Amino acid sequence: MLGSVSPDTDRAAEVPARVEATEPLDLLLRDLRSSRDGLSTREAQRRLIHAGPNTLRRRGTRQWPRQLVRQFTHPLALLLWAAAALAFSVGIEAVAIAILSVIALNAVFAFVQERHAEHAVEALAAFIPLHATVVRDGSRRSVDTADLVPGDVLIVSEGDKISADARLLDGTVDVDMSALTGESVPVHRSAGPVDSTVPLLQATDVIFSGTACTQGEAAAVVFATGMRTELGRIAALSERVRTEESPLEHQVRRVAWLIAAISVLLGAAFIPLAIFGAGLPFLDSVIFAVGLLVGNVPEGLLPVITLALAIGVRQLAARGAVVKRLSAVETLGSTDVICTDKTGTLTENRMRVITVATTSGDIDPFASAEAAEPVRRAARAMALCNNAHPSPTGELTGDATDIAVLAAAAALDPAAIGSAASDGHRLRQFAFDSVRKRMSTLDDAHGVHTVHVKGAPETVVPLCTAEVARDGTSRPLTERRRADILATVDARARDGYRMLAVADRPLPTGRPGPATPAAAEADLTLLAVVSIVDPPRREVPGAVARCRTAGIRIIVITGDHGATAAAVARQVGIVHGTPAIVTGPELDAMSEDRLDELLAGADEVIFARSSPEAKLRIADALRETGHVVAMTGDGANDAPALRRADIGIAMGRSGTDVAREASTMVLTDDDFATIAAAVESGRRVYDNIRKFIFYIFAHATPEVLPFLVFALSGGAVPVPLTVPLLLTFDVGTETLPALALGRERAEPGIMHRPPRPRGEPVIRRRMLLRAWLFLGLLCAVLALAGFFAVLLSAGWHPGDPTGPGTALHHAYRQAVTMLFVGMVAGQIGTAFAARTERASLRSIGVCSNPMLLWGIGFELVLAAAVVYVPPLQDVLGAAALAPWMIAFVVLFPFIVWGCDEVYRWVLRRRVPESSVPEPVPVPESSSVPESSSVPEPGA
Ligand code: ATP
């Protein structure tokens, strides 16, 4: 099968039209005009111009026409269509046209909002650029995956997403090919002769774009990029943001339907009531029934929710938390357990070796003079069993632990880093993995083969049978010495240090090197115990304190030593007493019931030396017991746990591509504080959604009550509102303030209340009562008061005729206008009241939401136009108001808002904020003790 590279005749690219991906490697390299040393930067840039960026174009047809059509055909719109048809069929074209305008306006609004939301989420891809490691100009460097070109030598290692089709040059890797083949069990791929008769996807030395490396490390030459890769051919679709309906949208959709059904019933019930009770002609009854129906269908609700979530997503991204689906914002708001790892999330991931303890004493590598032989031997092992690399600028790049260890090795013995810089000495590597918790290399120095190992002391020391004595000779490692060394490690870990043991094993010459980690990592000679400091991030204690007041439990799950984790957790305020430390093996031996019990208890608990499977079990146990779990992870093996948690959180900087892909949220700064901020944002967005749902619901009572008064009075009271005015009110006052409420800032105390229970409905009874029976009723009563005040002042008595041509007709039109303006005024008061659920408006600032002020400005202009622009007056049945009427109605917003202010005041006094215990004070600053006197291992 062929991996084709586009034909081009230009000299610069010099890559032939087609390369045979499975031809002998030398021929392939020749055809690609490349070598095992990769390309030069300049050549790569030239090729980029010809081959184009290594990206996948989204095929697919244009989406927007379909989206637009959907806005006109969703069920609530269909209901409105039916209402319009009804209006047409009974000959009331004006109403029908008004309803059609409502449908059109809503559709356009919803369409614009949906597109906006989609763009907001799609733009997030830019926040998590993917990088690939390539060899350019003879050294490794990280480039944007879009810049990969055919001929590049790509280095893939565990956790990397592979972003081009490439042929392995050396090394072995396990690859998750599920994106291409659907097969979820990783396959083994290694450099070597290929069977060119098998299909390309099964070739044992070819790796493909879109797949991921789950283990090992290899170098490979790229032969196809962008749309010419297998992935480009078959799928042509990069990861798309999932756009499934969130639980919130689902809930609201159901409620919207319920309300629509109630509106239909209400409308239908109104007809007989109006005909038989008020003696209204059939036609008029239908008109009003249709008006009621249209007025009460909350057609704008869903798009506003989508938009509010999208805005939340954008704000989160700006704050460093990129979420991949809208519903994550909502889930974040109800998160009640955060399972966090330690290194890089709670700590800075800027490590520095503080001491290297050998039998010749403890030394600070950066302050020591001439190193003794045991130290030099340890330095050699530290430099060789290491994957950090000096970048072209001289800085070390790679894993933070490796960087710290290499820097220390270089300081101890400058010759050591020289040998590490050239990879030629390394014959084999058994890469670090989070289950073994160690790495080893087989190195060659002038024909002498040596295994070098470094890793967690508890996993390395038991494999050691000897140690280096002060004079450089080896001596047996007794059980007592081993126990002493591990006791010393524990003591250092309790001070918060990250611990490593370094060992080696000279091999007899002439024998083949060990082929498995188990064979290599045996019979070791212990060289040194290394203490590394990784200070906690400064922002973390504050964020932890906020989580505590917000009732969010934090559980540390780390691969590190339990005592180190406990010390760091104490420094940042996660633990205060003596936490229960559960190690990986202890967790493995624990029954499900015991685990549930442990997690349900109030005890502080830390999971240390844990494996990725442990994370999955803990996530499962927490979810089973009804918690909403956010879980961090960075390794390739963490993917299942990240998928299982409600919110899987991957690290943007230090994490692997695989973890990022499996996660719901990526932290661009890897910082725990960002998780806390994201939870706060989630709570705020959810609160705001409740605010505008409340606001939209509060419309209902003022829209319905005037008709009821009319119907129940048996016609003695004229109809207080015309249908066109009702529709104007509905459209004119709903969307803009609702959108503005979606942008409210967080209410004070948002992180001082317990998390929202999983499954709590977005629309609560208290909220409905406040909307319909408190503020809604208040607005309706005020508006009706205005209506009657105008009528009565003109000498009206119940039952007096007010139709066209009667003496009271002008007063009636003024009264109807007054009712309309009164409703608008009431909604303004409601909009201010809706801004907070509990807090006083003063505490959040009366004018702190400028968009709401604009929305209200728009409402006022609309109302003024209705009242004073003659053509509009005629169409809508309105009349200009006298100054005293305006003066009267101006009071309404203040009355509504003031009454709600009193209600919230009572609420604050009667219902305490939360049942969350007072926060425990956290230390202002947290630092690891800077002691450097380390006991000799086992001294
Ligand atoms: P967390 O899970 O909180 O991020 P961690 O980074 O300490 O913690 P791992 O990366 O699994 O967890 O490391 C576990 C242990 O393995 C460390 O305590 C250290 O002793 C050892 N270790 C870490 N990195 C390396 C490495 N590059 N080479 C050898 N050993 C390492």
Image (spheres, rainbow, N blue to C red):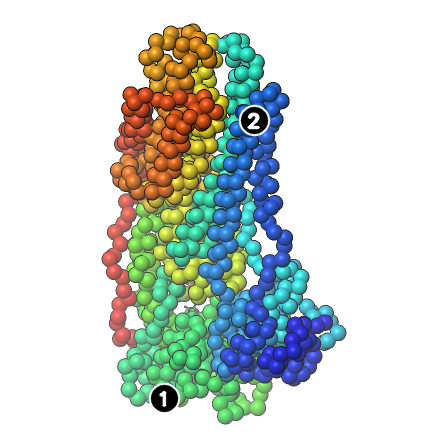
The crowd level at tag 1 (other Cα within 10 Å; few <14, some 14-19, many 20+) is some
Q: Is mark 1 on a helix, strand or loop?
A: helix
CA separation in Å, label 2 and label 1: 95 Å
User: 452 above or below 797?
Assistant: below
Q: Percent position (x, y) of residue 685?
A: 41, 44
Q: Which amino acid type corresponds to the residue marked 2 in the rendered image?
A: Ala
Residue at the image position 55 percent from the left and 77 percent from the top: 46
Image disc number at residue 96:
2
Q: Is residue 556 left or right of residue 934?
A: right
Residue at the image position 57 percent from the left and 16 percent from the top: 283
Q: Percent position (x, y) of residue 854?
A: 36, 40
The quarter of the picture where residue 333 lies is top left
Foreground of the two, 377 or 400 = 400
Foreground of the two, 885 or 871 = 871
Ligand 1 positioned in quadrant: bottom left
- Is residue 933 at all visible to an observer of this figure? yes
Residue placed under numbered mark 1 in the picture: 373
User: 675 above or below 143?
Assistant: above
- The residue at the far right in this view is 197
Q: Which amino acid type corresponds to the residue marked 1 in the rendered image?
A: Glu
